[in-house]
C-alpha cells in the first residue's frame, strides 16, 4: 500500500479554470516584458559532432557536479562527455535495456558532496548511481512500464518518476523510499517537472492534457488545448510560465497558475523536447523532422534553425514511423549561448 501525504490547504486555488481551444492571443504583459537584457547570436552553426552511441540518444543533461554532458541511449549505455571538446570521459552500463531518462543532484550543495545520477528507462527500474573513483549503483523496480522522465525537486530532497503505466511516483532521494504514488494521465505520462519551491509538479501525457499537482497527488489544475500527445512540459522561473510541446505540431505557452494558454506556436512537425535557457531569454525546441528551432522569449519569434543532424536515422526506431530522424533531447550550456542536441542518429552536436 502506497504511503500518501496528508492533504494540505491548496495554495493555488484561483476559482474556475479558463479552458483553451487551439490558440489564445498573447497576454502582452507577460510575454512582452523582459527583466533581462537579451544576448546571444544563434546562427545554427555546428561547433562539434560526436558519434556518441550505437543507437538513438534519448536524453542529455548538463551534469551539476562535473559541468559536463551526460548522455543516455537505447544501447543501454550512459556516457560522460567533455562539454568543450566532446571527448569521452567515462561510460557505464547497468543493464541491456534502453535508458531514456536522466536527472542528477548534489544533495549537499554547500559541501559539494553526495552527488547522485538517476537514470531510468524501458525496464521500469530507477537507478541511483554514485559517481566517484568507482561507481555505487542501487536500483528499485519503480514502474510496470517504461519510465519516460525524471525530475528533481527544488530542495534536492525528492526525485519524481513518470511512466507509461499512467503513474507518477515521488521518492526520497537519500533513502529511495516511496513517498507518494498516484494515477497521473490516461494512456501514459510523457513528461514531468517540479516548478516551484513548494514542490508543485507539472506533467504532460498521452491524454493530451497538462496537469498541475501538489506533491501529495492532489490535482490543482488541468490545462487543455493540445489535440495529440503532450510530449514535453518545461518551466521558465524567470517568467513563471510553462511551455508544452505536442504531437499536434504545436508549442503552447501557459500561465499555469490561471490555467490560461497565452500563445500557440505552429510547427510543421511533432515537438519532442523543449527547454528554456537559464536566463529565460530563449526557448529551444526539437522536432521530429531532424530540426531544432530557437525562439527568443520576448515575442517568441524564431531566431535560429539547426538542421545538421542526419535526416534519416541508421538504427531501429523506437516508434515505427517512416525513417525520419527524431531529435530527442536539447539543452543549453551554462552560459546560455551554446546548445547541445541529441537524436536517433546516435550523434550529439554542440552548436551556436
Image (cartoon, rainbow, N blue to C red):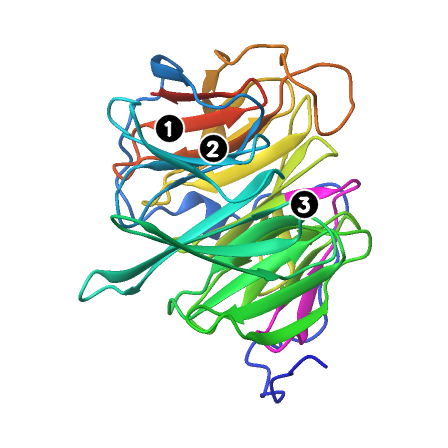
Name which residue lies at 61% across and 55% down.
Answer: 125
Q: Residue 24, can we see it?
A: yes
Above-or-below relation of 238 to 140: above
Image coordinates for residue 298, horizontal then vertical, percent: 42, 39
Above-or-below relation of 305 to 159: above
- Residue nearer the viewer, 45 or 175: 175
| Quarter of the C terminus within the rendering | top left
Cβ–Cβ under 8 Å for marks 1 and 2 = yes
Q: Residue 339 carries which label?
A: 1
- Residue nearer the viewer, 314 or 308: 314
Name which residue lies at 38% across and 66% down.
Answer: 156
| Quarter of the N terminus within the rendering | bottom right
Q: Of the residues tagged 1 and 3, which is closer to the observer?
A: 1
Q: Residue 283, can we see it?
A: no
Q: Is residue 229 magenta?
A: yes
**Residue 152, quarter of picture:** bottom left
Under circle 2, the secondary element is strand
| Span of residues in magenta | 213-231
Q: How far apart are marks 2 and 3 (CA)?
A: 27 Å
Under circle 1, the secondary element is strand
Q: How far apart are marks 1 and 3 (CA)?
A: 30 Å
Q: Name the residue under label 2.
A: 330
Image coordinates for residue 128, horizontal then vertical, percent: 46, 57
Image coordinates for residue 303, horizontal then vertical, percent: 43, 22
Q: Does the magenta stretch include residue 53?
A: no
Q: Name the residue under label 3.
A: 24
Amino acid at each position: 500500500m502506497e504511503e500518501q501525504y496528508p492533504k494540505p490547504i491548496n495554495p493555488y486555488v484561483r476559482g474556475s479554470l479558463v479552458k483553451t481551444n487551439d490558440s489564445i492571443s498573447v497576454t502582452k504583459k507577460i510575454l512582452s516584458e523582459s527583466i533581462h537584457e537579451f544576448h546571444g547570436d544563434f546562427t545554427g552553426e555546428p561547433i562539434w559532432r560526436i558519434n556518441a552511441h550505437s543507437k538513438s540518444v534519448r536524453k542529455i543533461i548538463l551534469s551539476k557536479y562535473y559541468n559536463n554532458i551526460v548522455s543516455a541511449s537505447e544501447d543501454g549505455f550512459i556516457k560522460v562527455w567533455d562539454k568543450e571538446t566532446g571527448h569521452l570521459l567515462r561510460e557505464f552500463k547497468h543493464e541491456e535495456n534502453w535508458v531514456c531518462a536522466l536527472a542528477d543532484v548534489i544533495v549537499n550543495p554547500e559541501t559539494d558532496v553526495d552527488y547522485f545520477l538517476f537514470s531510468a528507462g524501458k525496464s521500469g527500474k530507477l537507478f541511483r548511481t554514485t559517481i566517484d573513483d568507482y561507481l555505487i549503483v542501487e536500483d528499485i523496480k519503480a514502474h510496470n512500464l517504461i519510465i519516460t522522465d525524471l525530475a528533481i525537486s527544488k530542495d534536492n530532497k525528492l526525485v519524481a518518476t513518470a511512466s507509461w503505466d499512467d503513474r507518477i511516483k515521488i521518492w526520497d532521494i537519500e533513502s529511495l523510499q516511496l513517498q507518494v504514488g498516484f494515477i497521473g494521465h490516461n494512456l501514459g505520462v510523457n513528461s514531468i517537472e517540479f516548478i516551484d519551491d513548494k514542490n508543485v509538479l507539472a506533467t504532460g501525457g498521452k491524454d493530451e492534457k497538462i496537469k498541475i499537482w501538489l506533491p501529495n497527488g492532489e490535482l490543482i489544475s488541468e490545462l487543455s488545448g493540445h489535440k495529440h500527445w503532450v510530449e514535453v512540459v518545461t518551466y521558465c522561473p524567470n517568467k513563471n510560465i510553462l511551455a508544452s510541446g505536442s504531437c499536434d505540431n504545436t508549442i503552447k505557452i501557459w500561465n499555469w497558475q490561471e490555467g490560461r494558454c497565452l500563445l500557440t506556436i505552429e510547427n510543421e512537425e511533432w515537438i519532442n523536447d523543449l527547454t528554456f535557457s537559464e536566463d529565460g531569454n530563449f526557448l529551444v525546441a526539437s522536432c521530429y523532422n531532424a530540426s531544432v528551432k530557437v525562439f527568443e522569449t520576448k515575442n517568441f519569434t524564431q531566431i535560429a534553425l539547426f538542421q545538421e543532424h542526419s535526416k534519416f536515422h541508421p538504427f531501429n526506431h523506437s516508434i515505427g514511423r517512416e525513417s525520419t530522424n527524431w531529435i530527442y533531447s536539447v539543452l543549453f550550456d551554462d552560459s546560455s549561448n551554446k546548445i547541445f542536441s541529441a537524436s536517433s542518429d546516435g550523434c550529439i552536436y554542440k552548436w551556436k
